[in-house]
Image (spheres, helix red, strand yellow):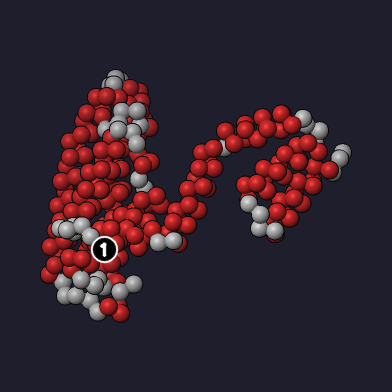
């Protein structure tokens, strides 16, 4: 048994301590480990490519989250607030109704991962909704600010939940179709998707009315003191 491949671990430690580029450190360490383990250069590259391809979905998740964190650190939420503050006639309710329609339509077309809490709600939609509410109402109290954030999150959930069932290739539709078929009611997934459209329309109307009603309720509230805002 040879211990030479363990040098790759030492290279990772040295590279991170020296604050070198992490991607370069990991790639060089992997290549060195493979060569010291007795592999040729080309098989080492093939092993790296296969490992990346097999775990690319996990890698995407871990790549997206730090990117969003960096964007927030360098002012993404502030830019979103500034942008919506310059739109004439923008209110919290109108903004979230637009997002609700966008979320439902894209989910109905199978693009359910185009939004979401970490990707869009926290860095973009919630700050824009807060800015729109403050633009129309004035400074929000901490309680009202939390309600606006909750409505932004609920809008994403409702849009996705009722929109994705219209897409006939989604797992939930296939599950329902399988249950019906097992009970002796053969139905095509497209038939189930068509019947999901009225539910989606009702959800849009009800939640849209709720958002616009919150706009009117905010207008009747007294303006909070600046120091009570988050």
- Does dot 1 land on a helix, a strand or a loop? helix
Is residue 23 in view?
Answer: yes
Is residue 165 in view?
Answer: no
Please give the residue where the numbered disc 1 appears in the rendered image: 131
Q: Is residue 110 left or right of residue 63?
A: left
Say which quadrant the N terminus sits in.
top right
Q: Is residue 53 left or right of residue 72?
A: right
Say which quadrant the C terminus sits in.
bottom left
Q: Residues within 10 Å of mark 1 (few under 14, many from 20)?
A: many
Where residue 169 appears, as percent x and y from the top left, is 35, 28
Give the residue at x 44% y 53%.
68
Tell me where residue 81 sits by quadrant.
bottom left
Task: Please give the count of numbered marks on the rendered protein.
Answer: 1
Give the residue at x 16% y 61%.
215
In this view, 101 is above or below 16: above
Where residue 83 appears, as percent x and y from the top left, is 28, 58
Where residue 31 appears, as percent x and y from the top left, is 72, 39
Residue pushed farthest right?
1
């Amino acid at each position: 048994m040879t211990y030479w491949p363990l040098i790759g671990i030492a290279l990772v430690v040295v590279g991170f301590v020296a604050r070198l580029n992490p991607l370069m450190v990991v790639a060089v360490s992997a290549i060195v480990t493979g060569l010291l383990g007795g592999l040729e250069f080309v098989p080492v590259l093939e092993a790296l490519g296969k490992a990346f391809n097999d775990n690319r979905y996990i890698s995407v998740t871990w790549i997206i989250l730090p990117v969003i964190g960096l964007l927030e650190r360098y002012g993404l939420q502030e830019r979103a607030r500034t942008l919506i503050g310059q739109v004439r006639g923008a209110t919290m309710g109108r903004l979230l109704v637009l997002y609700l329609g966008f979320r439902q339509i894209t989910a109905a077309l199978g693009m359910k991962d185009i939004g979401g809490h970490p990707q869009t709600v926290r860095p973009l939609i919630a700050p824009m909704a807060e800015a729109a509410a403050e633009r129309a109402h004035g400074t929000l109290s901490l309680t009202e600010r939390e309600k606006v954030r909750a409505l932004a999150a609920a809008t994403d959930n409702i849009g996705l939940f009722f929109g994705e069932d219209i897409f006939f290739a989604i797992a939930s539709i296939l599950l329902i179709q399988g249950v019906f078929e097992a009970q002796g009611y053969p139905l095509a997934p497209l038939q189930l998707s068509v019947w999901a459209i009225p539910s989606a329309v009702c959800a849009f109307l009800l939640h849209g009315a709720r958002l616009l009603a919150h706009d009117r309720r905010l207008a009747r509230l007294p303006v909070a003191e600046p120091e009570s805002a988050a």
